[in-house]
Image (spheres, grey):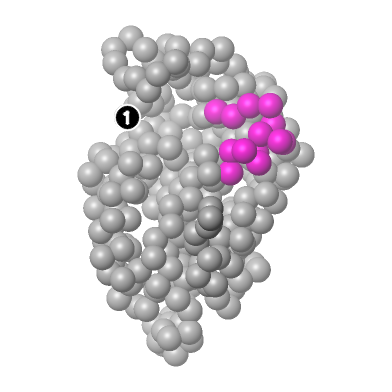
Amino acid sequence: MYWDNLTTKHFRDGVIGRIDTAILPTGSVEAHGQHCPLGTDNMAPWYFAQQIEAEYADRVLILPPVPYGHTPDLEDWAGTLSVSAETFRRYVQEIGKGVANWGIKHLILLNGHGGNTAALQGAMEEIAQEQITVVLVNWWLDFSQQILTITAGQGHAGEDETSVMLAIAPKLVHMEDASFNPFRPRYRIKGPGLADKSLRHATTGDGRQGTSAKGQQIADLVKTQLSQLLSDLWNDNLFDRTV
């Protein structure tokens, strides 16, 4: 079910005490190379959430997405909109506390933007104090090992992300403008004069290698992994034993 499509009566009678799991998609509005739409980081997690809703409509609530994220590294690229990490963290934190008030016991933060990660981890700590289990999923990162069986590389507006967009929103992708960034940082580093290499063309990786077929494989993979996550949440199977 979609949280905001319900009336308050339907929510009261059909959700409270019956559905205890929700997904909150988070993303950003920022440059994605010269070829992918500014809303790429919103469109991908929203698509994945829709696929889960189609299969688990009676067990999962999909929250309206948080579309603006923390993306200072791309602020100089046309169309990018960035909020502070603290603003973003507090906003997500208060949404999480709000859903806990209505009986949600499992909250999945389905994130599409790397710049949100630190703030989301902070929000998780606060939300968890409401006696709710919070899981952060960065789809391109958490499922990287599996994605790299489909693509040769990954990156911001790179092969994996471009492929997903070609699969889910092909009319918004302009492959004639796709680019390649040959530079890879050796360290986690920020500083003046680095952007021409770290985000050349607003890209990391090689978007030119993206295809719709690869994107559909990635989308199917993400759905499978999210389905497994739901199963693990519902069956209290969140840890591996090494001994």
As helix, strand or loop, the secondary structure at mark 1 comes to: helix
Residue 160 position within the rendered picture, expressed as x and y whole percent measured from the top left: 63, 34
Q: Which residue is mark 1?
A: 72
The image shows residue 36, relative to residue 135, as above or below, that is: above
User: Which three-letter amino acid code belongs to the residue tagged 1?
Assistant: Pro
User: Is any atom of residue 27 visible in this view?
Assistant: yes
Q: Quadrant of residue 65?
A: bottom left
The image shows residue 194, relative to residue 171, as above or below, that is: above
Residue 111 position within the rendered picture, expressed as x and y whole percent measured from the top left: 46, 48
Q: Residue at x 56, y 12 (%)?
A: 182
Q: Residue at x 35, y 69 (%)?
A: 132
The image shows residue 61, relative to residue 183, as above or below, that is: below
Q: Does 228 sit left or right of 110 as displayed?
A: right
Residue lying at the far front of the rendered structure: 243
Bin the neighbour count of mark 1 within 10 Å (Cα to Cα): few under 14, some 14-19, many 20 and up. some
Marks counted in the figure total 1
Q: Quadrant of residue 188?
A: top left
Residue 204 position within the rendered picture, expressed as x and y whole percent measured from the top left: 52, 22
Residue bounds of the magenta highlight: 143-155
| Majority SS type along the magenta span | loop
- The quarter in which the N terminus is drawn is bottom right
Q: Does 52 sit left or right of 3 as displayed?
A: right
User: Is any atom of residue 172 visible in this view?
Assistant: no
Please check the rendered image and state whether residue 110 is part of the magenta-colored stretch, yes or no: no
Q: Residue at x 59, y 29 (%)?
A: 154
Q: State the residue in front, 35 or 230.
A: 230
The image shows residue 243, relative to residue 113, as above or below, that is: below
Q: State the residue in front, 222 or 53.
A: 222
Q: Residue at x 62, y 50 (%)?
A: 222
Q: State the residue in front, 221 or 236.
A: 236
